[in-house]
Image (cartoon, rainbow, N blue to C red):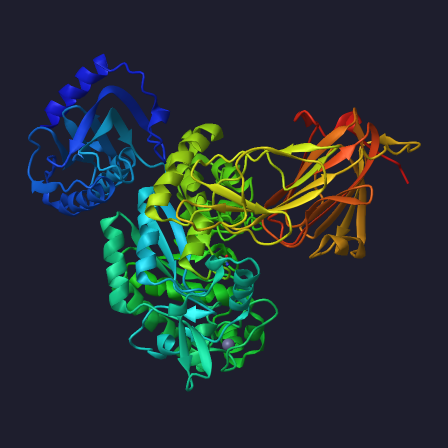
Amino acid sequence: MRNLWAALFVFLFATGCTNVKTEDVNLIPLPAELTMLNGQFVLNADAKIYYAQPELAVAATYLQEHILKQTGFSLSVVEGADAGKNISLLLNSELGEKDQYALTVNDKGVCLEGSNPRGVILGIQTIRQLLPQSNTEGKSSIGMQAMIVKDEPAWEWRGMMMDDARHFFDKEEVKRFLDMMALYKFNKFHWHLTDDQGWRVEIKKYPLLTENGAWRTYNKHDRTCMKYAKNEHNPDYELPEKRLRPVENDTIVEYGGFYTQEDIREVIAYAADRGIDVIPEVDMPGHFSAAIKVYPELACFNQASWGRTFSAPICPGKDATLQFCKDVYAEIFELFPYPYIHMGADEVEKDNWLKCPNCKARIKKEKLKDEKELQSWFVKEMKAFFDGNGKKLIGWDEIIEGGLPEGAVVMFWRPWAPTAVDVATSKHSEVILTPNSHYYFDFKQDDQTLFRVYDFDPVPEGLTDEQKKYILGVQANSWAEYIPSYQRLEYMVMPRMAALSEVAWNYSKREEWNKFYQRLIPHFSRWDVMKINYRPLDLKGSYLNNAFIGSTEVTWNNPLPNISIYYTTDGSIPTKESTLYTGPFTINETTDFTLRFYRPDGTAADIIKMSYRKEEYRSADKPENVEQGLALAWHEGIARKCEEIEKLPLKQNYVVDGIVVPEDVNRKRGLIYSGYIKIDKDGVYTFTLGSDDGSMLYVGDDVVVDNDGPHGPVTISGQKALAAGYQPITLYYFDMNNGGFISLKVLDSDGNEIELSGDRLWHTPH
Ligand code: ACM
Ligand code: ZN
């Protein structure tokens, strides 16, 4: 039968010139090879799903379920070969050794071949995206565009992490998450099951871990979430009732939840049916205080406590502690069938180890140099236990400090430890890339975020081809301190996850951003049907802070046809009773808008504040003795707000030809750029300021962009009406951990970018 398909392929290829373009099908991620053909396969309820090998029974049923959901057609599933106008699934090992698949759609039917069952599941996701998400009109047949797809992933590891410790998501929510992952061809579900704030996995030998360790009274994250829920009328931030339990005769409410081992098995099976491996993380030796709280003897001084920044870790000096860790992992190994298991090992505050007699004795006995080597010794101990059980240990990139255990897998997350990937791959350790600068999906989103995820090259420069072989792939992490509900999790990951899927699947063959953006738009309607609580796309060409002279037209270009915008001008939170935006309108006074985007099901996105300020052109200064370039002062130290920068000791003065960071400026940076920007003509200028961490831009005494505070990458724009001449600017920027960057883009009133260098920038020398 394979020959028949091959013959058909040749025939169609020869005659297959077609007007249909690849972008007409909006597949995400885009297949490696996609050839559009003339014609279509007309799918109706009479079609059957054939599967050629018994290993594909699960895939056939999975496809059947989704066709039913998406079209209403209840297809029968038949083991055996295709017999006409049908869908057939088969294995073809000749496709390769990765999870490849080949899909042919023509007027005769749909043939999906996979190199293995995983390949077939991946191809099913493509079929799902070729079908509508729902058949609300009740059509009796649906046309599928004819095409040939040959596809394979760029990377073996296409991961998403869920943090259940900070806030708990129940197993039905986990399944919804897995469904989203599957649709976008992710295949590794990293499950962060334990941390200071809660222990979520049942361990039979230590029942208190979940009986008590899974519960807590409200913590500061809970309280912040509740405050957002209230102040911003945002139900996404509410702590779900189902996570609360009254204790002590109803006098106290506790938050929590956990998975029984039975739940875990159910989730693993559900994930497997969707081609997804489940990788648990039981984070140790730090981030362990949920367990220490119930088994205090695990810690150096027999109590849970906090150090300067992180919680006090377990005591690697006590043999009983090591045994406890191994007992826990023994049950984890039993539960999770895949080779990779994550042991965390990030952010360990080691102060107690320097004071603890048991730790000191361990350091002495094992001839270790210091507490860093003690951590490394602990990781090696655990690694030996993993090895003995046939498991591969993954650790966060801190496992490199004090000596990387041979063969341990490194999960890179700290751009401020930039040599980690080089060191790990040169030692032939596998590496997974999850840099927090781009792939931490708990970080706030703005109008640049999606582009930054899509466009970013996660592979550090300078690796040899040999080193690159050790890069397994990419992953996004969504830490849940401020994600108290499942719908909030969806809001944080969608649409970013779709953008990441292109990196994970296509990496070096990604299309240009605009093409992806166009393909993405129809996916929002899909998510409407799937009831995914996505973050809508940003308005195109709008800024949060606008300036105008006289009067201006307010135009909000919403790229999503399914979203309605309601707004207020009195500062109140918009509801569906507020004014509906129906088209451009004119204002002639300063106006502050509060906008809220509503999805078709009536749920709302986060509020957006937009101001339109009526201004006069700011007169230019007339400085004397100016010289080219901006003055830059580097204040060395750690600031948390721009106003703190000047209080740090001045380290060095520079003159710079642009908003750049001189090479010798180290990670402890507070930078102040000052001088003049030379403006050619009167107009309203747009300043787009991006930074990680905070930044502030002033023109004269006026704040034009406030991007202050410690944060990940955030880009904010502001406008200012400026007269021609020398306009004084001051730009503050600080970075707390060297993951950071600063960028400033200026547009004139015609929307043309002004090059910020050369005779644009001036300063008065001291
Ligand atoms: C991490 O974000 N602490 C891995
Ligand atoms: Zn100790």
Rendering coords of residue 409 (x, y %): 40, 53
- Pick the residue in front: 275 or 295: 275
Task: Classify 609 as above or below 5.
Answer: below
Task: Classify 249 as above or below 560.
Answer: below
Q: Is residue 428 left or right of residue 147?
A: right
Rendering coords of residue 661 (x, y %): 70, 40
What quarter of the picture does the C terminus occupy? top right
Rendering coords of residue 163 (x, y %): 42, 60
Q: Residue furthest right?
A: 624
Residue ID at (69%, 53%): 668
Tell me where residue 94 sits by quadrant: top left
- Pick the residue in front: 344 or 59: 59
Q: Is residue 710 left or right of residue 390?
A: right
Rendering coords of residue 361 (x, y %): 51, 78
Tell me where residue 343 sits by quadrant: bottom left
Q: Is residue 325 left or right of residue 579?
A: left
Residue ID at (52%, 63%): 225
Task: Classify 447 as above or below 6.
Answer: below
